[in-house]
Image: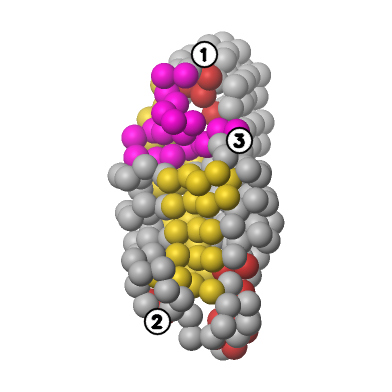
């Protein structure tokens, strides 16, 4: 029914005869393992504004078709173990996409990584523990870097962030202590307007460099954390 806003953890876990799901328009959250091991489930449409948490459809073996509505939000592991996730035809250059939404990245990615143009959203934990990535370029059009997106990318040394990004959620770059440079196309005043969440201090401690000229644009030497700039 439309009155349901949350489907709790394990709510339909192991319902092996469940073939169809119709979600109400007010649904906000599908919690972890809510539909895990629902082997008869073939397709699912996530309604607008709903968040799909980690492992929500884990090991629902026959789930082959996933549709995300505008403003749906997904954790990368939501569809692990499904036919959709395991089908190599759904992966392009080590990335799993649904439309313009990058759902997951292969952990074997290494070196310099450029997310393809046209990408609008990147799932939370999409690059979790991709430890051999050394640089990442995020394309124009992405507005939010969700929590834990690049968490524990311990080999990451540089990040290119587009002007379109307005929010970097907490823990997005937690455990990325090797970052030395952030590249950004506009001036420092514009960079400073980005809402940077907790546990992303590495982005405040390093120099910000122009992705156009390569020159540093921060008003203080790289490595000198001016805490008052962020905590006033």
Q: Position of residue 168 (x, y in %)?
A: 50, 62
In the image, 67: left or right of 106? left
> Would residue 48 be counted in the magenta stretch?
no
110 to the left or right of 191? right
* 111 or 218, nearer to the observer: 111
Quadrant where the image shows the N terminus: top left
| Residue at the image point whose x is 36% and y is 52% from the top | 139
The numbered mark, 1 or 3, whose residue comes first in the sequence reads 1
Q: Are marks 2 and 3 in contact (CB under 8 Å)?
A: no
Pointer 1: residues within 10 angstroms few (<14), some, or many (20+)?
some
Residue position for label 3: 107
State the residue at coordinates (34%, 40%): 100
Q: CA distance from mark 1 to mark 3?
A: 24 Å
Question: How crowded is the residue under tag 2: few (<14 C-alpha within 10 Å), some, or many (20+)?
Answer: few
Question: With respect to residue 222, does 10 lie above or below?
Answer: above
Answer above or below: position of 6 versus 138: above
Q: Could you tell which of marks 1 and 2 lies nearer the N-terminus? A: 1
Q: Is residue 49 left or right of residue 39?
A: left
Determine the image quadrant of residue 81. Answer: top right
Secondary structure state at the residue bearing disc 3: loop
Please give the range of residues in magenta. Answer: 88-108
User: In this rendering, does residue 91 appear at all?
Assistant: yes
Q: How is the image coloured?
A: secondary structure
Please provide percent x and percent y for residue 44. 43, 25
Q: Which mark is residue 62?
A: 1
Residue at 56% from the left image edge and 37% from the top image edge: 109
């Amino acid at each position: 029914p439309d009155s349901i806003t949350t489907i709790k953890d394990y709510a339909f876990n192991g319902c092996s005869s469940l073939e169809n799901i119709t979600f109400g328009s007010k649904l906000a959250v599908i919690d972890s393992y809510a539909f895990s091991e629902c082997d008869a489930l073939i397709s699912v449409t996530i309604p607008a504004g709903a968040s799909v948490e980690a492992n929500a459809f884990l090991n629902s073996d026959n789930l082959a078709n996933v549709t995300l509505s505008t403003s749906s939000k997904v954790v990368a592991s939501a569809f692990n173990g499904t036919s959709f996730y395991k089908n190599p035809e759904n992966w392009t250059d080590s990335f799993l996409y649904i439309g313009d939404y990058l759902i997951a990245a292969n952990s074997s990615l290494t070196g310099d990584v450029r997310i393809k143009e046209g990408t609008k959203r990147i799932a939370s934990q999409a690059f979790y523990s991709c430890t051999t990535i050394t640089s990442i370029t995020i394309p124009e059009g992405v507005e939010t870097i969700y929590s834990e997106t690049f968490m524990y990318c311990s080999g990451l040394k540089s990040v290119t962030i587009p002007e379109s990004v307005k929010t970097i959620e907490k823990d997005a770059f937690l455990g990325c202590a090797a970052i030395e440079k952030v590249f950004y196309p506009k001036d420092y005043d514009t960079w400073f307007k980005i809402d940077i969440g907790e546990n992303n201090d590495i982005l405040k401690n390093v120099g910000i460099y122009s992705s156009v000229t390569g020159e540093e644009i921060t008003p203080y030497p790289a490595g000198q954390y001016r805490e008052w700039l962020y905590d006033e």
